[in-house]
Image (tube, rainbow, N blue to C red):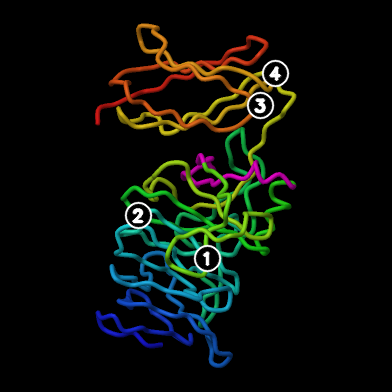
Amino acid sequence: MSIPGESQDKSFSLGNSFVPSKGQVAIFSAHNFQEIGVGLLPGLIATDRSSTEKGFIVFSEKSSWDNANEHSHVDGYVKSTKDGPFVFPLGDNGAYGAAGFSNARNVEAAYYAVDPSVAVTSLVLSDLYSFVPEAGPFDVASTNDNLEAVSIKEYWDINGAGSTRITIAWQESSDIEELVKSDLAKLTIVGWDGVEWVAIPSTLDEFAMDIHSSAHRDTENLSDFDFGSITTDSEIAPNEYHVYSFRRLSIDREQDNNDMTIYPNPVKSGGFINVRYFLAKSNRGILKVFNSSNQLMIEQEIEVQEGMIKLPLVDHRRGVYTIALTNAMGHTIYKKLIVVDL
């Protein structure tokens, strides 16, 4: 592996590199992953995954990379000092699980191609780790009511205090078609909050993220069951959850009650909220937002049984608001929205 100083020179790796516990190797320029089929770690840059004493590959502000794939990637932890969007070239056990961030500064992450309920993967140069990260295992049966199966194929350990949108990608090994029962609209990102898996409002990327470049750009390929990506609807601090994965949303289309989830809540004045909704036995409805004086602030018609609406809160000052969701038969549910100062 070649790691130059901070310059415009290019570096490349042929694998066979390992960053031990507490170690950090920085990449300062354009890095090209290359595969060669010799040595203990052909094509791989590996780091120690120990819970408290990890090793890291660090991508600095002027760095970039190309050509990572299931055979050539970082098997372990990546850290970034870059402002702005960046894709992490993550893998584990011969599987590739790239993750992208709208703001990658001070984000660190690793991919685990194992069942979260087990949370044990192989140590590249010897035996097995204990639970990784240390908060594991993450029981796939522990979830809130509107979720069904959590992926038993993979999860991501993502850490950082700053706000960023998170994009995670899948390949054939993720078995997404089986997970969502052939309905991609049911796919969501979930996070483990220490007790259970929680749905994070997410939107399927129409065009899959390019997982072979750090540029965080779209490909010309539509997301499908074999290859694709999904992104959180809002910026979040990765530290809000211990790990992340995929899950199938569960909605009974014959249920008698409307359903509505609001995120973020509380929300800052002048920001926006995402409203994920379901209309019971109806394809038409109306969404209304009222202030504490019961004055109508927003009214929006709905013509699809389920979906997500993004609402700007331009004129909403600090206070408690009520959101009402009514289907065509007149059935209404209410949720409270808390708006705080900027």
Whole-number angstrom distance, CA of label 2 to CA of label 3: 34 Å
Q: Is residue 197 above or below residue 207?
A: above
The type of residue carrying mark 2 is Asn
Whole-number angstrom distance, CA of label 1 to CA of label 2: 17 Å
Q: Give SS at disc 1.
A: loop
Residue at (58% x, 15% y) in the render: 326
Whole-number angstrom distance, CA of label 2 to CA of label 4: 41 Å
Choose the circle earlier in sequence order: 1 or 2.
2
Residue 306 shown in magenta? no
Task: Name the residue that disc number 4 marks.
Answer: 256
- Report crowding for label 2: few under 14, some 14 to 19, many 20 or more residues within 10 A (C-alpha): many
The type of residue carrying mark 4 is Asp
Task: Name the residue that disc number 3 marks.
Answer: 305
Nearest to viewer (mark 4 / mark 1): 1
Question: Is 243 positioned to the left or the right of 236 in the image?
Answer: right
- Which residues lie in the magenta part? 182-201
Q: Give SS at disc 3.
A: loop
Q: Horizontal and vertical percent for residue 339?
A: 33, 24
Whole-number angstrom distance, CA of label 3 to CA of label 1: 33 Å
